Amino acid sequence: MSDVKTYKMMIGGEWVDASGGDTFESMNPFTGKTWALIPKGGKEDAGRAVAAARKAFETGEWPKMTATQRGHLLRKLGDLIAEKADALAQTEVRDNGKLIAEMGMQLKYVPQWYYYFGGLADKIEGAVTPIDKAEHFHYTRHEPLGVVCAITPWNSPLLLAAWKLAPALAAGNTVVLKPSEFTSASSLEYAALFEEVGFPPGVVNVVTGYGHEIGAALTEHPGVDKITFTGGPETGKRVYATGAAQLKRVSLELGGKSPNIVFDDCDMENAVKGAISGIFAATGQTCIAGSRLLVQQSIHDEFVDKLVAFAKTAKMGDPMSMDTQVGPVTTVPQYEKILSYLDIAKDEGAEVRMGGGKAVRPECGDGYFVEPTVFTGVNNRMRIAQEEVFGPVLSVIPFKDEEEALHIGNDVVYGLAAGVWTQSMRRAFTMSEKLRAGSVWVNTYRAVSYMAPFGGFKQSGVGRENGQDAIREYMQTKSVWMSYATETPNPFVMR
Ligand code: NAD
């Protein structure tokens, strides 16, 4: 194990081991081998991190800084991330097996969140109210919430951390970040960058460990004012309930079962690429996967033939290689979950048009690979059409007309995203209006930006990330009243 790297956590400006000294292994999903040892933090470490974040929120340099100074630090951080993007991307690939082509691009994009919210930090203005009480002056202040606990999943650790940390810090909060136990290394390396650009100790703490241990301890901690969580729907519900017990602010970005809807007037070549990017990019391990492909009956067979022909050209293998198109599944439990859904779909009567099992190819080595899979003959009531698989598994569902496409598209508990492929402007606007999803893409798919609000309808989440309003998720409004009356009127009645 000599080439195994050992990491430490960042609490209150110090690099520390877990209080019990325990560690756990992080596996490279392409080689199947342990490559890092991560501190296995628990309740005591959660307490230390929250105390450090609380102290930094209340005393020291951070609360004394102006919003302009905070913004400046965030922009400096963006510059440093840009410098280190390649190294951070490689750590992510080693940990989560996603393609270097995608993670390299993601990490080069992450600085934009710090530039954007850094720029916004000193533009959050209160108001003077033309108040309806004589001889009173009233104004509002937008203040930070306090200690923010940010919990992230394994699929895009640093991008999703930026969605939370950039607005939380711009607003003046302090943060305890807990990455997934499957992909903790990149967030620990990230912590060093906050230190290097000069964030005061305790403003950003990164702790690691299992979700049910340190994750739960953080969400239960009375010193946490806000939880911002991205992860699976079941964990999200548990986190929401825990937060509710103490009336904490909670925002949730959860799963999806997004419809990607192809009409017969689409540009077929582009729509085929859109369907592929919806489900096989990132090995289908994305919350916005277009895992239900709704195809208009009149072009169904031709479209599926083209899709399968294109998908068969996808190059599988080493995610560190720039020309790989489909990489391994990130975690062993996820790999087993995907395989179990392949059996569920077959038992339900879905027809395997392509793939349908483990990928056993020389280029896949000992990695956890699943064949890109296309099921046809799926109806929307099947489990394969209703439940999130989070893998390269596409369910093709035929539809007759717009009305039926909308009905099927909306007929799931989720509402994270939807795609529409059409050349009709009327249809594009109508579908965008009627699809119950937080993001709708027309003739494109999987586009995200720091400027574009992102979040779920229905059980896909609570709250929004990205865009200017996201900073409000980390602030609270105070009403300040001042009287300049010379006399206080009757004290027994309301003013
Ligand atoms: P997960 O719910 O298993 O874990 C997410 C995080 O929660 C991890 O850091 C984990 O350690 C922590 N956790 C687990 N149990 C906890 C508990 N009891 N208390 C507090 N924290 C706990 O999810 P995952 O498997 O890492 O990620 C995949 C899921 O994330 C998918 O459902 C996917 O759709 C979703 N996701 C959503 C978005 C989005 O923006 N909507 C983005 C990426 C992933």
Image (cartoon, rainbow, N blue to C red):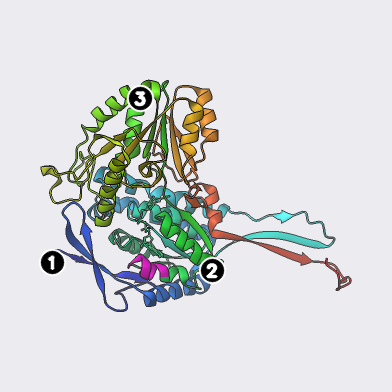
Q: Amino acid at mark 2?
A: Ala
Q: Quadrant of the C terminus?
A: bottom right
Q: With 193 as the anchor, is 36 left or right in this view?
A: left
Q: Secondary structure at mark 3?
A: helix
Q: With 305 as the anchor, is 73 left or right in this view?
A: right
Q: Which residue is mark 2?
A: 245
Q: Secondary structure at mark 1?
A: loop
Q: CA distance from mark 1 to mark 2?
A: 44 Å
Q: Which residue is mark 1?
A: 1
Residue range of the region highlighted in magenta in the rendering: 209-216
**Which is closer to the viewer, label 1 or label 2?**
2
**Picture quadrant where residue 34 is located:** bottom left
Residue at left offset 32%, top offset 55%: 154
**Picture quadrant where residue 40 is located:** bottom left
Against 301, is 325 above or below? below
**Crowd around label 3: few <14 · some 14–19 · many ≥20 (10 Å):** some
